[in-house]
Image (cartoon, grey):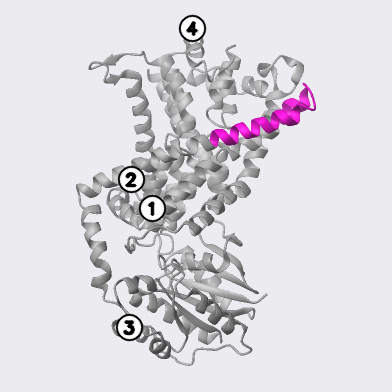
Amino acid sequence: MKKIVLVGKPNSGKSLLFNQLTGLRQKVANYPGVTVELKSGRFEQFELIDYPGAYSLSSLSRDEEIAVSKLNDALQDPATALVICNLDATRLESSLMFGLQVQALARRQQKAVVFALNMADELQRFGHQLDTVALSAALGSPVFAISAKTLLGIHEFRQGVLALASAAEPAVPAADHGDEQALRDLSRSLSRQYGIQASLVLKNQNRIDAFMLNNLSGGLAFLAVMFLLFQSIFTLAAPLMDAVEAGIGALAQFVTGFIGAGTTTDFLNDAIFGGVGSFLVFVPQIMMLTLIIGLLEDSGYLARAALICHRPLSFFGLSGRSFIPYLSGHACAIPAIMAARTIESPRKRLITMMTIPLMACSARLPVYALLISVLIPERAYLGGLVNLQGVAFFGLYLMGIVIALLVSLMLSRFVINRDEKSDMPFILELPNYRLPHWKPLIVRVISAAKSFVYRSGPVIFAVTVLIWLFGYFPHDAGGLEHSYLGQIGHFIEPVFAPLGLDWRYGVAILMSFLAREVFVGALGTLFGIDGADENIAGLAANIQADGLALGAGVGLLLFYVVALQCVATVATIRAETGSNRIAAGLVIGYGLLAYALAYLAANLL
C-alpha cells in the first residue's frame, strides 16, 4: 500500500487534520522508553502516517532524534508517495521554517510535497485574505488554505492530495532554497508578505494571559483548575469504576452460577474475574484523566500551567509539566505515569515517572485509615475545626510529596546523567486559546485506554493469578495462615521482626502487592474480622488488643508511604520506560528505603 506522510509543528492543528482524513480507523506504534508515537490510518487507498510535532529537523532530544530518524526512513521508502506539511496559518514564519526543511529533505529523496495551511478560518475571522496561488509559486509546491476544525477547504484539499499521491511521476519541488540561513530568511520574508500580523492574532491572547499569568489572579485560577482536575479524577471516574467492578462481578456470578461451589468457582471468581477486574477498574480513571488533560492542552491552558510551575519544580530537577502527573498521582499512579508523556525532556520525564509512586494514591487510604485509627486518638481542637487524625492524614500526604521532591533532587543531581539528548531545555510556545475539538479527544482517550489494557494488563493479570494460587493452596490446610502464602509469611517473619511485626503483617504486606488496599482485608482475615474493609473500627480494636507497639505502627505507616507495592504501577512503569531494570530498581530501592524508615521508627519510638 502506498503511504502519505503528515508532518508539522506542535499546536498547528495537525492531529485534527489527521483525524478528519482518517476518521477513527487508526493504530498507534510506540517506541519503548520514549513518547514517540506514529499514528497511522486509512485514507482512501493510501496509508496516512502522522509523525510527532517538531519545530525543527535539528533534533534536541532522544525523542525528537528518533522521530526525525523515522521520518528520514519514510522518505527513503519507495512506498511513500507524498509528504503533507501542515502549517499554522496564524504563525506562518515558525511553521514555514520547519516546512522548508522538510521540503528540502523531500526534494533530495525525490518526493512530492503539499502544504496544508491550517486554521485558515482564523485568518477569515480577522479579515485577512491569503494568496495561495502566489505562495505556491514562491514555495515551489502546492498550497491549500484549510481549516481542519470547520472543514473549510477540506474537500478541495482531499482531491488535491489524492491527485498528487496517485500521479505516475511525483511532483518533486523544483526550487532549491539554499542552506538553513537562506531558509530562515525566506520563511521570514514570505511570512511578512503573505501572513497575518502577529499583533492582530495575539491581541485577544495577551488580554487573557494578563489575567491567567498574573501572580495573584493567575495563581488563583491555576489552583481552581487543578482542584477541578483532581476532583474530576475522583468524582467523575468513580461511578464508571463502580460500574466496571459491578459488571465484572455480575458476569462472574453468571458464569459461576452454572458450575456450583468449589475450587473452580473460587478460581474463576477471585483469580480470573478478580484478575481482570484488578486492571480494568483503572481504565475509567485513565480515560477521564486523558480527557481532562486533552481539554486543557487543546484549549491552550496546559502550556500556561507548565509555565507557572516550572520555576519551583526546576530546582528539584523536574519540569513545569511534572505538576499535573504529580497531582493526579494522588488519585492513582497509573494514569499519572501515563500523563507524564507530556513532559518535553526525556530526563525530567523519567524522574517524574520514577517519583510519582511516592504520591499518596487513593489505594493507600484504607491502610492509612486503619493504622491511624489504631495509633492516633480521635481528638478535636479549636471547636472541632482541627481533628488529630485528620492532621495525621495530612502529614502522611505531605511526607509523600516531600520525599518525592527530595528523591527527584537526588536523581537529577547524582544518578541520572545530564546530557544534551536527555535534558533538553524548557522550550515553550504559548498556543492560542481555542475551543477543543471532540473528535481527536475521543481518539486520544480510546488510545490511552487501549494502550494500558494491552501493555500493562497482561502483567497485572498474571501476578494477580499467581498470588491467588499461593494464597489458596493447599486448600484444605486451614485457611490463609496455612496456605503457601502463609508459609512464606512464617518463613520471612525474621525479616519483619526488627520492625516489631509478626508473620501476619508480613502476609498482609505480600498480598498488598496486588493492590495496597488488600492489606486491610488480608489483615482482617488473619485477625478473624469478616468484612474488614467495611469494619475498620472492629479490626482496629483487635489490633490494639493484640498490642501493636507505637513504633511498629508508625513504622508500618512510613513503610506504606514509601514502598512501591502496586503491581499495576510497576507494570505501567515497565511499559512506559521499556526497561525491566528501572521497574525492578524502583521496587527494590523504595522497598529498602521504606524498610529503613520503618526500622528507625520501630527502634526510636
Which mark sits nearer the N-terminus, 3 or 1? Answer: 3
Which mark sits nearer the N-terminus, 4 or 3? Answer: 3
Asked whether 552 or 571 is in front, the reply is 571
Indicate which label's residue lies in the foreground, 1 or 4: 1
Q: Main secondary structure of the magenta part?
A: helix
Residue 133 spot, x, y in % from top left? 41, 88
Residue 407 visible (yes or no): no
User: What stretch of residues is rendered in magenta?
Assistant: 241-268
Which mark sits nearer the N-terminus, 2 or 1? Answer: 2
Instruction: Identify which residue is drawn at 59% across, 21% down.
Output: 522
Tell me the SS state at disc 2. Answer: helix
Q: Is residue 186 left or right of residue 474?
A: left
The image shows residue 264, relative to residue 131, as above or below, that is above
Instruction: Count up the numbered dots.
Output: 4
Q: Which residue is mark 1?
A: 296
Q: CA distance from mark 4 to mark 2?
A: 46 Å
Looking at the rendered structure, the kind of residue marked 4 is: Ala
**Residues marked 2 and 1 touching at CB (< 8 Å):** yes
Looking at the rendered structure, the kind of residue marked 1 is: Leu
Q: Quadrant of the N terminus?
A: bottom right
Q: Quadrant of the C terminus?
A: top left
Q: Which residue is mark 3?
A: 194
Q: Which residue is mark 2?
A: 225
